[in-house]
Image (cartoon, grey):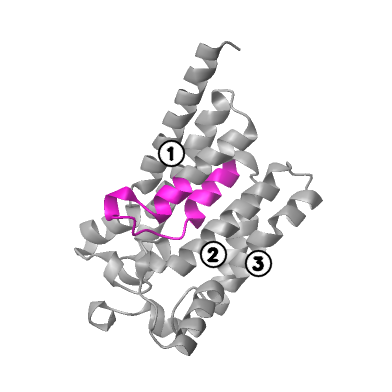
Amino acid sequence: MSEMTQFWSIVGFAFLLLFGYLLGSIPSGYLAGKWIKGIDLRNYGSGTVSGSMVWEHVAKWAVVPVGLFDIFKGALPVWLGLRLGLREVAAMLLGFAAIIGHNWPVYLHFHGGRGFSPFLGTLLALFPWGVPIILAGLGIGNVFGSPAIPLLVLISLPIFAALLNGPSIVLWLSVGMTVITIVKRLEANRRPLPDDPLERRNVILRRIFLDRDIQDHESWIQREPHQHN
């Protein structure tokens, strides 16, 4: 490969990364809140622009188009990368660009969701069996009100891939998404931590394992603007 060809390959890949990020940044949950109920979803429940908050505060039927579009955001860049001859690792990075865009969207001042829907799209292109596995983890976690369950399933994804003869890339998909998930939970859309050291530690632990600042799940997801600090 000549230096010029290599240069344009790098430029093309950088363009695809930017495309993935900007596509991922399209805030479908936020738009659903604005178009259907005239609300800013960032001020409700967990404060995330996510399908779960669309379900709780906008309209249950709206979860379907929002979720499908968010899955599409993760699948399209990966599919394009593979179609253009990129290796699986490079295509995976395009999926992560879309997930990062979803979690930190430039259009909403980097105030986004949790990234599991675009991650499903990335899995759809690279390890389709991972989609029902992650959906099962999300469903069980929702039934028991435990965000720790989807995280455990995510961490265990390489084990499932090994049992199903999946590609080795699943290990890096699992590691990358686990890191993104923990960082996003801790960052919490820049929600401030308490001043008291003990309570700050408790909130940090709750964010990692419960994905919320308080113990009670129902109170957390039902919060309205006047209840936010």
Which mark sits nearer the N-terminus, 2 or 1? 1
Q: Is-magenta flag for residue 177? A: no
Name the residue beneath numbered marker 2.
182
Name the residue beneath numbered marker 3.
152
User: Dot 2, how many residues are within 10 Å of its Cα: few (below 14), some (14-19), or many (20+)?
Assistant: some
Asked whether the viewer can see residue 175, the reply is yes
Tag 3 secondary structure: helix
Q: Is residue 202 shown left or right of residue 36?
A: right
The residue segment tinted magenta is: 98-124
The residue closer to the viewer here, 76 or 190, is 190
Which mark sits nearer the N-terminus, 3 or 2? 3
Marks 3 and 2, how far apart in space?
12 Å
Q: Position of residue 24 (x, y in %)?
A: 40, 45
Mark 2 touching mark 1, by CB under 8 A? no
User: Which amino acid lies under the numbered mark 2 shown in the image of this protein?
Assistant: Ile
The residue closer to the viewer here, 191 or 102, is 191
